[in-house]
Amino acid sequence: MTPTTRNDLIGMYTKMLTIRRFEERVAQEYAAGAIPGFIHSYIGQEAVAVGVCENLRLDDRIVSNHRGHGHCIAKGADVRRMMAEIHGRKTGYCKGKGGSMHIADFSVGMLGANGIVCAGLPIAIGAALAAQLEAGDRVVVVFFGDGASNEGEFHESLNLASIWKLPIIFVCENNLYGANTPVGDVLPTSTIAERAGAYAIPAKTVDGNDVLEVREAARGAVAGARSGAGPSFLEFKTYRWHHHFEGGYFPDLRRPEEIEAWKEKCPIKRFEEKLEEDGVLDRQGREAIDREVMAKIEDAVRFAVNSPYPDPEDALKGVYSE
Amino acid sequence: MRKLSYQQAALEALQEEFRRDGKTLYMSEHVNEPLRQEFGAARVRETPISESAFVGAGVGLAGSGFRPVVDIGMATFGFVAMDQMVNQAAKITYMFGGQAEFPILYRMTIGTGKSMAAQHCISPYPMYMNAPGLKIILPSTPYDIKGLMKAAIRDNNPVISFEHMALGDTIGDVPEEEYVIPLGVADVKRDGADVTVVALARMVHIALDVASELEEEGISVEVIDPRTLVPLDRDTIRASVAKTGRLVVVDEACQTCGAAAEIISLVVEDGDTYELLKASPKRVCAPDVPVPFSPPMEQYVAPDKKKVVTAVRQVIGKKLKIGGVGSNTT
C-alpha cells in the first residue's frame, strides 16, 4: 500500500463526501423542478472516481460518460460552475449549452461527459495518442459502465490502444445494471475485465467500494501508462443507489433488498469506519468536514439559482470556433 | 503554372501543411506512402478497420492540441462512424461552450462511375449539411482541391472533404506559388448571361461541356461551382440568378433532400431574387435509388450532358437561335 499522509486521507474523504452531497442536492433540486432534462446520479460510486483520480495530475486527462458529475468533481472542477450548468444557467461550464450530460472542464483535464454510451472511448484514444506524441508522461483515463462494454467502439478502442501502446487506463464501473438490464443478461462471461485479455491488455477486477483498493489498483495502472507500458483495464464492482436517472420516467426494477444490501457497503461509510479505526478522523472531525462541504454545496446552489439564464438568441452562437 | 492531377494536388496540400504545422497527423486504413516517407510512421498512421475508433480519435486528438487528417476512404464507410462525426465532432464545440477547438479534416470519397455498386457509391453530403457544426468542401478541380484542403486543415473546426472518385486523374493548372482558397467562396467557372447552372463536384465538368455546346446555339450559360457546401456562398448564387433569371442545379446526390434542394430553396426564398426568375428552377439529380452495379444502369442514374441540356432548354423555353424568344436579348 502506498504510504499516505493524513492530509491525503482527509482529502479523499472530503472529495467523496463532496460528490455525495452534491448529488443529493442535485436530486433534491431536480425533484423540486428546478433542473431540466436528465440527471444520472453517481451516489454509491464515489470511491471509483476519487480513488482513480487520486493518482492523476492536473495535466492528465479524463473522459467521462453520462454519469459524470463524480468524475468531474474528483478531477478538480468547480462545483458552482457545475451546478450552474446543470441548472441551465449562463454561468455554467458550457454556458448552458450542454447540461448535466455534457459537463466538461478542459482547464482541469476533464474532457467531457458524454450522452452517447461508449462514445468517450474513441475520444479518449485520441487524447492518449496526443499524450504519447507529446513524449511527456501524461496519461488519460476513460470512465464507462458495464453497458458500454457491449458497444462496438469498446472493442475497437481497446484494440487500437493495445496496438499503439497508448498511455490510457480503461476504467469500467460495473454497477451491475445498464438502465434496467442486469449485467448477467447481456454478458456471457463472469467479468468484463477478462475481455481486455483478448486485446492483450492487462486487467483487474476490484472492489469498487473500497477507495484505498481503488487507489492502489489505479496506481499501478497509471504508473504503467506513464512508463510507456501501454494501456490497462480496471473493472470496479460497485452499485448506484439511485435509478438510472432521476424522475421516475420508467420504474426501477431492482429489488429493494438488493439496494439496501449495497447501501450497507457504502464506500463513504466504509472509509469513515477505517479512518476512525486508524485514529485519523473521529465523528467530530467528520461532522466538521460535512458542515464545510454542505456550505460549499449550498453556495453552489445559490450561485446557480441566482445566475441568469442565457439569452435565447445565444442558441445561435458558438457552433464554430473562430 | 504546372499541370497536376486532382490526386497529386491533394497530396501537395497535405505535404505543404504537414511541413508547416508539426501538430498535423494522418490516419487511414491504407497508408499514405509519400506522406509516411516524409513525415514518419508516428505522424502518418495506419489504422485497423475501426472507423468509429479512429474517427473519434480525431476528436480527442484535435481537442488535445493536434490537427488530425482522418482519411475514411469511401463515404459509404463513413456511416459506421456517424456518431463520432455527427454527435461528437459536429456538436462538441457547441455543447462544451467553446472550451476547446476541434480542428479536424475528414476525407471521404464520393460519386459513381467505376462500377463499385451500392455500398461503395454515394454522394452523402446532404446528410452532413443537416448536421450543424461541420464544414463541408466539395472540390472539383486540382486547383480547388489543393487550395480548399489547405484552408480546411488550417480551419479550427471539423471539416469534411468529399472527393469524387472519378476526378482523381483529371489534370488541371496548379500554381507554383502557395495559395489558399477560403472556405465559403463559390467560383464562377464560366461567365454567362442566359441561365445559371450550379454544379457540384464531377457535375461541374459536365456543366462546362454543356455550356460550350450550347454556346454554338447562342445560349450563354453561367456555371457556378459552390466549392464549399457549408458554409454555402448564397450571395454568389443569388447574384447570378438575379442576373440570368434562370436556374438549373446539377447534383449527383439523390434528388430527395439533396444539395440541389437547398440551393434552389435559398434562391426561391429570397424575395428579390425570386422576382427576377423567368422560369421555375430545375434540378438534375440522381434518382432515389441505390447505385446499381451494371454499367448501363450506373451510367443511367448519374446526371449526364443530355439531361443537363434538356433541363437548360426547359428553363429557357424552347430550342433557341440567337435573338429568339427567351434569350437575353428580348
Image (cartoon, coloured by chain):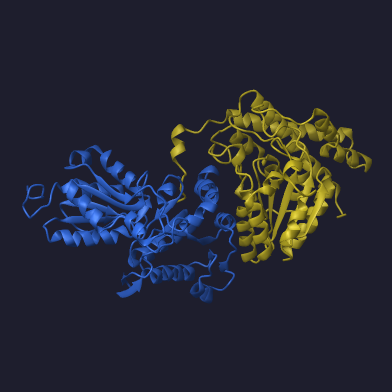
Left or right of B146, for residue A218: right
Please state the horizontal and vertical placement of residue A141, each as a whole percent of the image: 69, 53
Left or right of A115, for residue B9: left
Q: Is residue B97 visible?
A: yes
Please state the horizontal and vertical placement of residue B106, each as a whole percent of the image: 48, 58
Left or right of A117, for residue A55: right
Please state the horizontal and vertical placement of residue B272, each as a whole percent of the image: 21, 39
Q: Quadrant of residue B264?
A: top left
Seen at 24% across and 49% down, the residue is B248
Left or right of B12, for residue A103: right
Q: Is residue A231 visible?
A: no
Who is closer to the viewer here, A244 or A128?
Answer: A244
Please state the horizontal and vertical placement of residue B258, each as a whole percent of the image: 36, 47
Seen at 44% across and 49% down, the residue is B128
Q: Chain B hue?
A: blue
Who is closer to the viewer here, B236 or A82?
Answer: B236
Task: Kindly indicate which chain is depicted in yellow in the rendered structure.
Answer: A
Seen at 84% across and 44% down, the residue is A210
Q: With respect to residue B179, does B59 lie above or below? A: above
